[in-house]
Amino acid sequence: MKKLNIGMVGYGFMGRAHANAFRKVGNFFNLDYQPVLKAACGRDAAKAKEFAAQWGFESIETDWRMLIARDDIDVIDIAAPNDVHAPIAIAAAKAGKMVLCEKPLALNAAEALKMVAAVEKAKVPNMVWYNYRRVPAVMLAKQLIDEGKLGRIFHYRAKFLQDWTISSDLPQGGAGLWRLDAKVAGSGVTGDLLAHCIDTALWLNGPMDKVTATTETFIKERKHNLTGKVEAVSIDDASLFLARFANGSLANFEATRYARGHKALYTFEINGEHASISWDLHDLHRLQYFEHRDEGRVRGWRSIHVTDSDHPYMDKWWVPGLQIGYEHSFVHQVADFIQGLQSGTPAAPTFRDGLATDYVTDAVLKSARSGRWETVKR
Ligand code: SOE
């Protein structure tokens, strides 16, 4: 079996999700490549060492430039905050490394475009970690849509609701809280949460033509963890938008960190001419499906427990009826990336697909400022 040497930048929540996926994939999928956790990279040597020991990385680096310079690294995996995605990805591509990048691809579409140019010029395999595509129930939704079961699509509806930033005592910036600092995150819930909804939507329902949005920052000032000073908050705390898709369907999207009681409630619903589907991250192994052409007396919403061996990915896990969870979506993503290397057909979402999402988030933020419908670039 060929080795795929991984050099990972970042050791936070996402670093754990990626490292776990690299470790597990070979146990469950028969692949030609085996990921090897070669080096974990982070600025704090003590934390990097602790992380490397916990997850089985062979070595550490404290400067991503040194990591990229190493001959024994095949893949640079970026699990660090958004403001370093572009410089690391571009340098890695120039050095001929494959690049995996956490979502959103960049701070904005202009930066994402440079990243796309770099990986395409260097012809290096690349992928963005929009992991929810790889939840079996979501993949089943994709299969049903591609088979034409829904018919013409009328509506797409998505939400991503959280409640972890409601307290005004919560500081912004630094480890764990960089998502509240616009300089590091690029935006608030638009880039962090809506980006997931948009990636899934573009994949399931095709390109978007235009959007009209509104955003709000409920808490205007927060103490900054790095400066110690109270500073203006410039992320969007909530972001809502309407969209028109190229296929003629109408959509609404909402993301907030101020929906008390909701922790990570990502839901979407699609209404077609013949059928509707809906999915809910808090019940991620189920797909709700309504088929109008069923016999009238028994017609109703079916709750499909997506755990059978003919469901996407499920033949690789336990036995029918035993469900899997969040972390498995990352394992599937690594498996698909490797299968893309083997087959020569790159696994999506590539950086170019990630750019498409950044074009939408840019249009959403632009519309929130202008108060007008904005065209989505392609
Ligand atoms: C934010 O809380 C967050 O961790 C996102 O950054 C992730 O992308 C999402 O999957 C869960 O919520």
Image: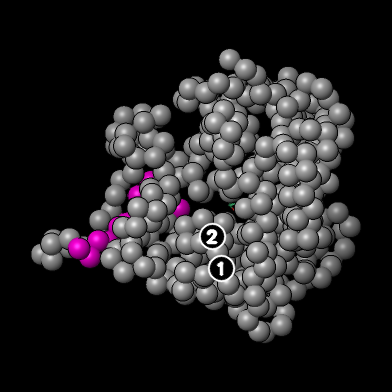
Q: Amino acid at mark 1?
A: Met
**Is the residue 111 above or below the residue 139 in the image?**
below
**Is the residue 106 above or below the residue 368 in the image?**
above
Q: Residue at (74%, 55%) from the top-left corner?
A: 112
**Is the residue 295 above or below the residue 88 in the image?**
below
289 in the magenta segment: yes
Check the image and tell me how it is coloured: one colour
The percent position of residue 165, horizontal first and vertical second, equals 64, 62
Badge 1: residue crowd in 10 Å (few <14, some 14–19, many ≥20): many
Q: Amino acid at mark 2?
A: Leu
Determine which residue is flagged by label 1: 208
Q: Secondary structure at mark 1?
A: strand
Towards the viewer: 367 or 230:
367
Image: magenta residue range: 281-293
Quadrant in which the C terminus appears:
bottom right
212 in the magenta segment: no
- Alpha-carbon span between mark 2 and mark 1: 7 Å
Judged left or right of residue 133, residue 371 is right
Determine which residue is flagged by label 2: 202
